[in-house]
Image (spheres, rainbow, N blue to C red):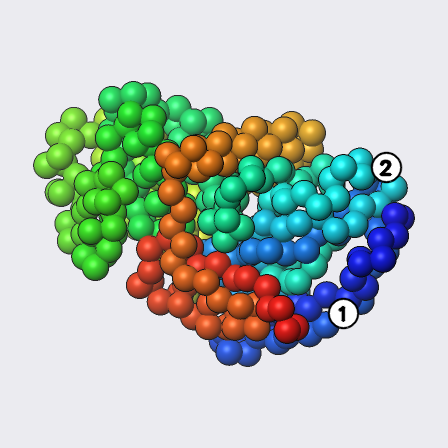
Amino acid sequence: MTTEATSPTTAVEVVLPGRVEPDELVITRRSLPPLGSGQALVRVDATGVSFAEQQMRRGKYYDQPPFPFVPGYDLVGTVVDVGAGVDRTLLGRRVAALTKIGGWSSHIVLEAADLVDVPEGLDAAEAETFVANGITAWQMLHRIARVGVGQTILVHGASGGVGSTLVQLARIAGIRVIGTASARNATAVDALGAIPVDYRGDVPQQVRAMAPEGVDAVFDHVGGPGIVDSFRLLAPGGTLVAYGSASTKDHAGNSRLPVLKLFTRLLWWNLLPNSRSAHFYNIWAGKRRLSRFRRRVAEDLGSVFVLAAQGRLHAQVAARFPLSDAAQALELAESRTVTGKVVILPDLEL
């Protein structure tokens, strides 16, 4: 391990102790482990609240670890120490990483190979909104659905973290976007470049009025019974990309069952004799081929960061909270009243 005089030996963390309300999160301090070969110690400059943490709090995320654990799906930070075998020019560089858990911390040990450079000039909080959200949106749009210029897509939850990024990426690519949102967020969705549709109304009827032949792709994080409408709204040759089951997050019972039901339904549709296709997107699905997974994450997030650095892609920061107020950050994210992503920043006094 490379030892730096300024390298911290402890980290402040926000722990999710079990199926609890946001105000029952626990703030602790623990000793950092020694760095192993290929590892880096990262000071967390910004993390955030995604839908994953909201599910984890309820014990509903498909493959979450057993309680207790530190949530935090992704982060932007600065490398403050490196282990053996890691290029020391990494020290002091701002990086981004997918973590799944562990991001709600002042410092975290990560594999150096999982770190992606963040361009200079990007604010840490703004860059943070593009990590998991940007990778998800880019890969669904360009690697799975492969939507082309002039085509039309439907984005459910267009004012959310993934949705607002997906809308912008689609508009940059010359794609027409219809986006569902609450009436209060219609103006924000319109500002992003999408045609807003009130999700509380008759969505299929509203979408059919704008796309009589159907849409070329639907991006659906809601799941539940509404997934049938999403599939039926596809034009011939269209693609449905499901990437969650938000409608069942408060349902009692087995946390995996809604996802398994959704996956089975998508598989069944693909077996039917029609030209439409259905996919379930999981950002971690390719990790069994680790080198390829890392390469694609770096390429796709890098493409998103370039667009952000050019000023073509705009961060949607819903609010900023200090790490010590992670409970309030989680409550706001769950209120469904915000556009974009709630970001958590370090507390200097901790």
Q: Mark 1 points at which residue?
A: 30
In the structure shown, which secondary structural element does the residue marked by tag 1 occupy? Answer: strand
Residue 344 circle label: none
Residue 164: image x %, image y %?
35, 45
Q: Is residue 140 visible?
A: no
Q: Is residue 33 above or below residue 173?
A: below
Which amino acid type corresponds to the residue marked 1 in the rendered image?
A: Arg
How would you rate the neighbour count of disc 2 (Cα within 10 Å): few for under 14, some for 14-19, many for 20 or more? Answer: few
Instruction: Please identify the quarter of the rendering in which residue 111 is found.
Output: top right
Which amino acid type corresponds to the residue marked 2 in the rendered image?
A: Gly
In the structure shown, which secondary structural element does the residue marked by tag 2 occupy? Answer: loop
Closer to us: 203 or 317: 317
Q: Which residue appears at 60% of the width and 68% of the height?
A: 347
Q: Which residue appears at 28% of the width and 28% of the height?
A: 175
Residue 202: image x %, image y %?
15, 49
Q: Mark 2 points at which residue?
A: 85
Q: Is residue 191 above or below residue 9?
A: above
Closer to us: 189 or 42: 42
